Image (cartoon, grey):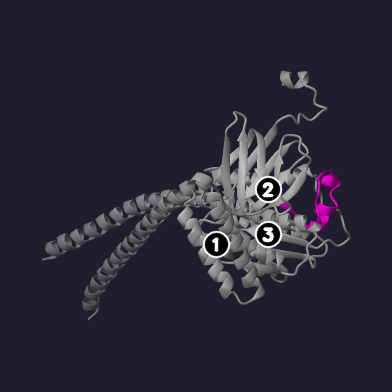
Amino acid sequence: FGLRRMMSTSSVRSADMSFTFAAPNAVHYNAAVVRQVDVPSFSGAFGILPSHVPSLAVLKPGVVTVYEEDGTNKKFFVSSGSVTINDDSSVQILAEEAHKVEDLDINAAKEVLAEAQKALGAASSEVDKAEAQIAVEVGEALVAAAQ
Amino acid sequence: MLSQTKQLIPVLAVQCQQQRGMANLKAIGLRLKSVKNIQKITQSMKMVSAAKYARAERDLKAARPLGNAAQSFYEKAEVAAESKDAPKELYIAMTSDRGLAGAVHTSICKTIRAELAEKANTDNIKIVCVGDKSRAFFQRWNRNNILMVGSEIGRLPPQFGDASKVANAILTSGYEFDSGKMLYNKYNSVVSYTTTTIPIFSQETVSNADKISVYDSLDADVIQSYMEYSLASLIYYAMKEGACSEQSSRMTAMDNSSKNAGEMIDKLTITFNRTRQAVITGELIEIISGAAAL
């Protein structure tokens, strides 16, 4: 309580980014401090640094790269999800599925892409076509990430 | 002749007493067997719930950051439902199909019912019942307010696919709600949970929020996709919390049942033994008095 009185409470300390990267299958970062995060979104891939302008974005299938404080970077494949950047520099990435790129198997990824392309060819209704198209996008991104 | 009837009656009376004593013994024996079976069943249910609870708690640890992150945008952007004259409201009740879990389902349903009772006009309020237990409750009191029902919940641990199915159903139902509330049981510890509310906002409310202009490069498409995904995430989080609370509550309830059954078995065993001894004593007396008569 004494500490709080010493620091100014009027200005928001936006020097550090509080980064949360969560998916239903695992939580990769929970309110961690990282240097930079690159995200693939439908409005283009962009990098997020502390004090980034607040924004919302929807994730495209692709690779999220996290540059940590000690200089190392980690890559994760995400299938879809959302990104929130708040005005206090906190960033939340909620992914539907997120896995480390090292865990991806290139052959399995190629199989997924082949199946998705077959489904796209066989799709008849608009909804089926759209779903198959999404599967193809994910498959292509998987193959690109696994290489 | 009179003396002959006098001899008959005592014999008949003794036979009736014998039957009464034996009937009591059989009845107590049956009850004892049935309570022992109940105790076995509740004990095994407790073991099963304990195993499911351990898994649910592990899953919840992973899901909590997801839930907090999903809610944080709405808090930070200070989205508040504006007061309209007759707002269309939506209640989502996160329960499940399976009972014998203590008060988990009824606490949610009663909270919703109390809120509905306070409102003057309930025509603009719809309820989404996730789980058959809430459906059974609302069919009795507010049948017209049920929008849709989700079944087959509670048997398997909830997955994100289930949550996205519910979110999809709500968004494609055609009911354009202005504000919504999702009620679920937030897990505190093995013995306690709290019935909590998460507010659900409509796209319009988010677009009109105070701090939304702070967020850069937003168009209606991005907001819509974001809202849909965040609804699915919140439903997933509520399902995980609800599952953990339900399993822990069922474990406690079954444990209490087993203990109560154990007490009943003790009492019944004592009564059974006493009755058995009384019957044996009665038979001995008959034999002895019969032998004495001879």
Give the residue at mark 3. Answer: B92
The residue that appears at 82% across and 65% down in the rendered structure is: B121
**Mark earlier in primary sequence (3, 2):** 2
Give the residue at mark 1. Answer: B153
Which residue type carries mark 1?
Ile
Query: Is residue B217 part of the magenta span, yes or no?
Result: yes
On residue B8, which mark appears? none
Mark 2, secondary structure of its residue: helix
Q: Quadrant of residue A90?
A: top right
- Quadrant containing the N terminus of chain A is top right
- Image position of B1 (left or right of A125): left
Name the residue nearer the viewer: B91 or A117: A117
In the image, the segment drawn in magenta is B195-219
Give the residue at mark 2. Answer: B70
Q: CA distance from mark 1 to mark 3?
A: 14 Å
Number of other residues with Cα within 10 Å of mark 1, as a class: few under 14, some 14 to 19, many 20 or more: some
- Image position of A24 (left or right of B69): left
x and y percentages locating residue A34 in the rendered image? 64, 33
Query: The numbered mark 1 sits on a residue in which chain?
Result: B
x and y percentages locating residue B223 in the rendered image? 77, 55
Instruction: Residue B98: tell me if it is visible.
Output: no
Name the residue nearer the viewer: A118 or A131: A118
x and y percentages locating residue A97 in the rendered image? 57, 52
Query: The numbered mark 3 sits on a residue in which chain?
Result: B
